Amino acid sequence: MIRLESEEGYKGKYRFEIDSAKSLITADYHYEDTSRFPARIKAAAIALCLEGFSGTFEISHDEGLLIIRQL
């Protein structure tokens, strides 16, 4: 759990498959406008991948609280 300085940003909960060996991240994301993917959640998934984490993760954000859970 990470408390961010700002409470701004999209809220939501997303599931990711991360394969750090292949630098591959897939997200369970269904929204008409794919350009509206939450930047804070995307950054958290990229950070996990760059730090060598692999597996299934759930990342959520609401009012400045970012939660990362490995499933």
Image (cartoon, rainbow, N blue to C red):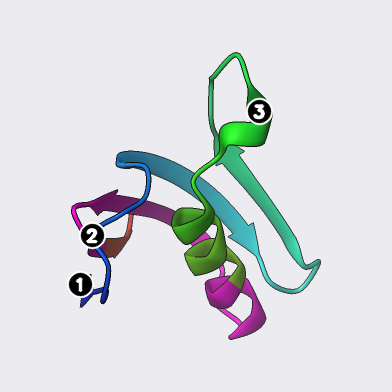
Could you tell me how far apart the alpha carbons at marks 2 and 3 are, in whole angstroms?
Answer: 22 Å
Dot label at residue 7: 2
Percent across and percent down for residue 58 are 36, 51
Tell me which amino acid carries mark 1.
Answer: Met
Residue highlighted by disc 1: 1
Percent across and percent down for residue 25 are 67, 54
Residue highlighted by disc 3: 34
Dot label at residue 65: none
Q: Is residue 62 left or right of residue 20?
A: left
Tell me which amino acid carries mark 2.
Answer: Glu
Determine the image quadrant of residue 6: bottom left
Determine the image quadrant of residue 36: top right
Q: Nearer the viewer, mark 2 or mark 1?
A: 2
Q: Which residue occupies the extreme top position in the image?
A: 32
Along the polypeptide, which appears first: circle 2 or circle 1? 1
Along the polypeptide, which appears first: circle 2 or circle 3? 2
Q: Secondary structure at mark 2?
A: loop
Q: Is residue 54 left or right of residue 15?
A: right
Q: Secondary structure at mark 1?
A: loop
Residue 14 lies, with reference to residue 47, above or below; the image says: above
Q: Nearer the viewer, mark 2 or mark 3?
A: 2
Along the polypeptide, which appears first: circle 1 or circle 3? 1
Residue 71 lies, with reference to residue 29, above or below; the image says: below
Determine the image quadrant of residue 71: bottom left
Tell me whether circle 1 and circle 3 mark residues in contact (CB < 8 Å). Answer: no
Residue 49 lies, with reference to residue 41, above or below; the image says: below
Residue located 62% across and 72% down the image: 49
- Mark 1, Cα crowd under 10 Å, few <14 / some 14-19 / many 20+, is few
Q: Nearer the viewer, residue 7 or 42?
A: 7
